Amino acid sequence: LNLRDHEDLIELPAGLQAYELLLGGTGLRRLPEDLRVQLRLDLTGCEHLEMLPAGLQVTALNLSRCTNLVALPEGLDVWSLDLTGCWAFQHWPERLCIRSGRLSLRGCTALQTLPQDLRRLSALNVRECPNLTRLPEGLVVTGWIDIAHSGLTTEDSLPDSLQRVQLRWGGVNIDRRVAFHPELLTVDEVLKERNAERRRVLLDRYGYSRLLLDARAEIRDTDQDPGGERQLFRLPLPGDEDLVAMSCHCPSTGRQYIIRVPPETPTCRHAAAWIAGFDNPDDYQPLVET
């Protein structure tokens, strides 16, 4: 049964049973207590969804971008679970069964823990979960764990059962040194990496600010804004487009930001306009910048 993108759909009838139920983009706030779905229940982008029925059993449950969902129901039983972009989610039920499938938590920024009785998964994505600082003891992941920009920043954040698991950073396989010891990376290692995806990861781990300084990047342009001096840097990357980035400071906090912009960007003014969503810098005329 495919009811995707029916925004005016706010409830389902009692007694509904389906092999596959696609409800993405609907206006549902809750589901019937007696709902039965055998294979796949897709609720992608149901921004108003607040509650799922207790004891829900389904093979694959997709709750990505259900931004109003705070907790999962008691007795939930699934093989795979996708909570990507559920930034309000933070409460696990006391009774939960995830049967060795994939668990995706990317962008669950409020989440601090995983269920302590979680034992086995085929893959785990905790990318962009900054408040998740440790995984449960005894957890086994047979495939990979994506830890990019999560709170898993040290080897101690992984239990002994995960010391040999394959790590990923933004979908790219990495080793422990790249994951947990970016201070050991060198400029030459970053610049001479021939694989574009791996170089992207090394750039991320090394840090743009540090790389531009250590590699003595060319200063293409300099000007002033309410935050102070802005600088536009250019660094050639062998076999790839130039790395061009603008350094600027927040007017209210003084914090420095290094923001990558298109390689053909000629000035800081062009860079600021592009960051704000304008192709023509003359169209970017803010009254106040904060």
Image: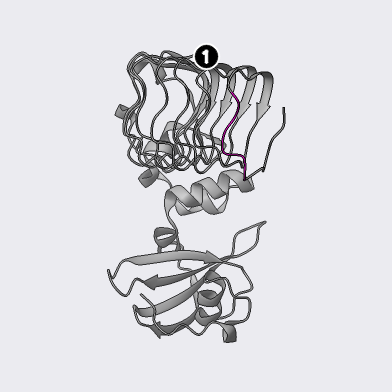
Q: Position of residue 198 (x, y in %)?
A: 57, 43
Locate residue 238: give its quadrant: bottom right
Classify the position of the C terminus by image quarter: bottom left
Mark 1, secondary structure of its residue: loop
Between 153 and 99, the residue placed more toward the observer is 99
**Does any portion of residue 50 appear in the rendered image?**
yes
Instruction: Please tell me whether residue 134 is drawn above or below residue 202 in the rendered image.
Output: above
Which residue appears at 51% of the width and 44% of the height?
47
Q: Is 84 included in the stretch rendered in magenta?
A: no
Q: Is residue 198 left or right of residue 290?
A: right
Between 17 and 148, the residue placed more toward the observer is 17
Q: Residues within 10 Å of mark 1 (few under 14, many from 20)?
A: some
Classify the position of the N terminus by image quarter: top right
Which residue appears at 60% of the width and 41% of the height?
26
**Does any portion of residue 194 appear in the rendered image?**
no
Q: Is 10 included in the stretch rendered in magenta?
A: yes
Q: Position of residue 228 (x, y in %)?
A: 34, 80
Q: Position of residue 31 (x, y in %)?
A: 53, 28
Q: Position of residue 217 (x, y in %)?
A: 48, 69
Q: Which residue is the site of mark 1? A: 100
Instruction: Please tell me whether residue 148 is drawn above or below residue 101 in the rendered image.
Output: below
Locate residue 73: give its quadrant: top left
Q: What type of secondary structure mainly makes up the magenta span?
A: loop
Range drawn in magenta:
8-13
